Image: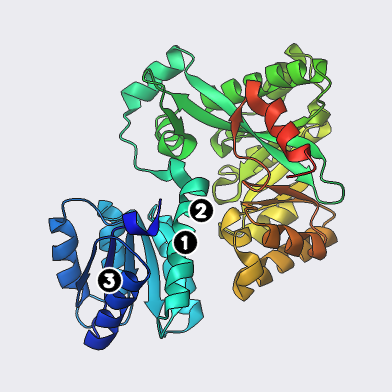
Amino acid sequence: MSLSDLRVMVVEDHGFQRRMALRLLADAGGGASCAAAAGAAGGVVVRQLPQPPDVLLVDLDMPGMDGVEFIGHVAQRRLARAIALVSALDPAVLKTVQTMARAYGMRVLGGIEKPLTAEKLQSLLESYDASLQFHDDDEPVDITLDEVRAAMLRGELISWFQPQVEFGNGRVVAVEALARLRRSDGQVVRASHFVPLLEREGYAQHLTDSMLEQACRWKRRWDGDGLRLNVSVNVSASTLDDPAAADHYQQIVQDHGVDPADVMLEITEGSLVTDAARGLGVLARLRLKGFGLAIDDFGTGYSSLAQLSQIPFTELKIDQDFVSGASAEPRKRAVVEASLDLARKLRLEVVAEGVETVEDWQMLAEMGCGMAQGYLIAGPVPGDELAEAVARWRRPEH
């Protein structure tokens, strides 16, 4: 999308800075622009627009409804496609608000420290297309439990796969299986739009079994084509309450002719082990059977260190919210560095998720990270397109 096509709205209480932002937008060749002097007024204006703005430039420190409250209002009602913060406040505050907006499901382009300049604005707006490239599947999706259940019965819950690459030699060594729902009109819906529905309604076991079975079938097919890869499959923590879970997963992989040692079971940190005694026993038995265990989305929950000390993990996955852009953000970089140091001391392999730029790749390589996963390498693809995705990554001109 060219800058002239972007619809931008400025929410800024300082009259001169608001007018300057509009002038800079016009000079940059931006499309239709509008403005509001405060959060409450901005809420009225944005609801009256014929189309949601592509980008909201929002100041935080405003009278009445401040920028934080305004962003929450916009995010919950999906009144804009993306936001960017323009503020002179502490960068730590800006980072917190960006994280809040992402938690609401909002696309965040970043933060600009005041004063706003033509160069800062140009760089921000030019990042809009890159944001769409990496997160175009985050658009709102209207989906019901009945639709998801029907999709399960029709076999329309499918696995897509995203490669994981070793930093040392750039070799693709594994893939993560990611759930997708394929609608009758051809639209493919990502997991975040339907997995919470399934877990809430007690279908987590069915989903996990389906993803594991599909991953094993594809692995055998890739092995036969000379593409030997390990597979990672997400496991809902609720399934670990079943004492028979370890035997059940072992049976699935063996029925498909796959060695458990070639399978990594990923468990999201924020949902680990509800029944401690039973869950820990299942996890220990999974390790005895040869499965790898990964703590997924590390750093996003509240019990990281306790879980790491109790569970026999073999791999730590650093969440993409910390990895993406870490080369340019000292606080993110510090979290990544601390995670890598902890993993080394615990003798865990590390996968950095959300690697999207050469700069982030180089930073992680210099820090001694083991593996990378992200759009710099390849996005998730159907199983029959994986070989081509791996080939594209291997090409010298990549």
Quadrant in which the C terminus appears: top right
Query: Residue 393, how many percent across, how many down?
Result: 73, 39
Q: Secondary structure at mark 1?
A: helix
Residue at 64% of width from left, 58% of height from top? 304
Q: Secondary structure at mark 2?
A: helix
Query: Which residue was labeled with disc 1?
Result: 126
Mark 2 or mark 3: whose residue is earlier in sequence:
3
Query: Which residue was labeled with disc 2?
Result: 130
Inter-mark Cα distance, 3 to 1: 17 Å
Q: Secondary structure at mark 3?
A: strand
Inter-mark Cα distance, 2 to 3: 21 Å
Q: Count the labels in the image.
A: 3
Mark 2 residue crowding within 10 angstroms, few (<14) / some (14–19) / many (20+): some
Mark 3 or mark 1: whose residue is earlier in sequence:
3
Inter-mark Cα distance, 1 to 2: 8 Å
**What is the number of the mark on residue 10?**
3
Query: Residue 197, how many percent across, how many down?
Result: 39, 34
Q: Is residue 83 above or below residue 230?
A: below
Q: Which one is in front in this view, the residue at disc 3 or the one at disc 1?
A: 1
CB of mark 1 within 8 Å of CB of mark 2?
yes
Q: Amino acid at mark 3?
A: Val
Q: Is residue 237 above or below residue 315?
A: above
Q: Quadrant of residue 341 in the image? A: bottom right
Q: Is residue 119 visible?
A: yes
Q: Is residue 130 above or below residue 42?
A: above
Q: Amino acid at mark 2?
A: Ala
**What is the number of the mark on residue 245?**
none
Q: Is residue 281 visible?
A: no
Mark 1 residue crowding within 10 angstroms, few (<14) / some (14–19) / many (20+): some
